[in-house]
Image (cartoon, rainbow, N blue to C red):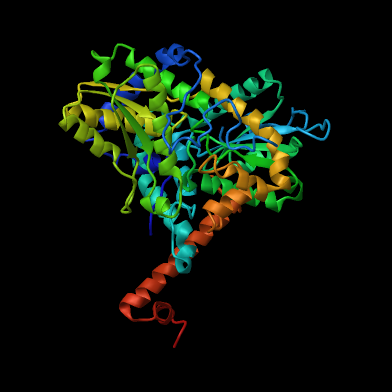
Amino acid sequence: MPLVLPPVAAAAARGADGPSTSGRAALQPCSSRWRQADSSSGARWVGAERQHQQPRSRRLTRLQAATSPPFYDQQGSSGSLGALQPGGGAAVAAPAGGVQTERVGVLLLNLGGPDTLDDVQPFLYNLFADPDIIRLPPAVQFLQPAIAQAISTLRAPKSKEGYQAIGGGSPLRRITEEQATALREALQRKGVDARTYVAMRYWFPFTEEAIAAVKSDGITQLVVLPLYPQFSVSTSGSSLRLLEKLLKEDPVLARVKHVVIPSWYARPGYVRAMADLIQAELASGAFPDQGEVEIFFSAHGVPVSYIEEGDPYKEEMEECVALVMAELRRRGVDNSHTLAYQSRVGPVQWLQPYTDDSIKELAASGVRSLLAVPISFVSEHIETLEEIDCEYRELAEESGIQHWGRVPALNTNATFIDDLADAVTEALPYVSSLARSSASLGASLSADSLVPLGEVEALLETYDRDRKVLPPPFLAWKWGWTRSAETWNGRIAMLALVLILLLEATTGQGVVMRLMEVHGLLK
């Protein structure tokens, strides 16, 4: 029964079961230290605008880290929708065939996180009820809800400790909504009046809510933008499968033309923004000798089995780090660097080297200054604020690292947001092109990127052919004759049946028959 957790989820579910050896008492000062650094680092986020130059390696020449459109044909509150209320829209001109009024939407996909400590257990239930997270054999898939309930209940107390250390809940929803607002404003400055929607997979605002708002607003062109720079089935796959299901089930939504930007790690603005942040932290005064600092890229891990099945995440991550380092080299930053993977959970093999092992090895080799760079995270959340800032920092200090720094997540970094707006505007003219001739267009794009831009169904056909049934989101227990009560009644009945079968198998006696005899119902 492999346990496969996407970013954020792994740290959320793992709770206190991490590399830290100093106990939870030190976590609150750690999180407070980061919040102060976060508030003071905003002025350093935006550096000089420079044209990005790619490394001239054979492996990276196909990346589109330039001002031309990437991957394209060069010729041709809990429960509340909040900012997703109907209204607005967009009017843009079609790229060819005359002027056509369209209503444009941008759907931002993210994982989600519990807003409060009370949300932790139901959030974890939604996570573990996803068959992408716990993969069961077909014969016992009916046990998924019971297993999800058991695991989420057992892990919730430790997970709550982690969320308590970063303020009592995840900041992911707030930051993602701020990113959505900033992106909409950036698009307006570029002449595109578009609506932006936040679609979380495992907590509010759920993808179902965002898609309902898309339908209510009458959106006719939808750009789907996962907030993961690198593509992986473990991060985008479940969200895209749910999106595919919602688009197909509704005849109105089925007519919405859409396109997915599956990964954007090679975009020049993203690379510049990451280089700006790293350069600013190196010059922040935290290190006595900037040239001796090890630049330590920490990415969320995925199981090796995913990579063996064709997931491009590892190669995209390596290319992303190479691009960022090439930009830093161009600026005169010649520090050595390391790429490692964090947040592994369960008995399966994950991508290596592991972050905790790499920290120990670097310290043992004589490294005394380390700058952590959360390369796969564009928002602050539990994996940056608790896992990196607290657990890995404590581990580094215990291992002999004397000077520690951490690059802040991009959040609403101006260079980053402006580049995302460029990505959206560059994608819009190709929405109709993909719908008309996805096969021919896909052939022309295949040489430009590991994962070319495409429609949801085409991407899933390539990278997630085994599309499992997705459960509806679970919110929390409610009294009365409600859907929640019916769900719990079904779980209790299923657990009772499983226990009876186990007893009969282990004792060799018919438990039901024995009970009937005891109560005089069978003579």
Question: On the image, which quarter does residue 26 sit in?
Answer: top left
Which image quarter holds the N terminus? bottom left
Where 307 sits versus 514, above or below? above
Where 460 sits versus 184, above or below? below
**Image x and y of residue 117, in percent:** 43, 35
Q: Residue furthest right?
A: 98
Number of numbered discs present? 0
Which image quarter holds the C terminus? bottom left
Residue 460 is left or right of residue 339, and the answer is right
Question: On the image, which quarter does residue 401 sit in?
Answer: top left
Where 521 sits versus 227, above or below? below
Residue 474 is left or right of residue 439, and the answer is left
Tell me if residue 474 can be seen: no
Please tell me which residue lies in front, 260 or 53.
Answer: 53
Going 70% across and 28% down the picture, which residue do you hit? 194
**Image x and y of residue 284, in percent:** 33, 12
Tell me if residue 313 can be seen: yes
Q: Residue furthest bottom?
A: 523
Where 459 sits versus 140, above or below? above
Please tell me which residue lies in front, 98 or 375.
Answer: 98
Please tell me which residue lies in front, 80 or 199.
Answer: 199
**Image x and y of residue 474, in percent:** 54, 48
Please tell me which residue lies in front, 448 or 396.
Answer: 448
**Image x and y of residue 517, in percent:** 41, 82
Residue 213 is left or right of residue 307, and the answer is right
Going 43% across and 30% down the picture, which residue do you hit? 56
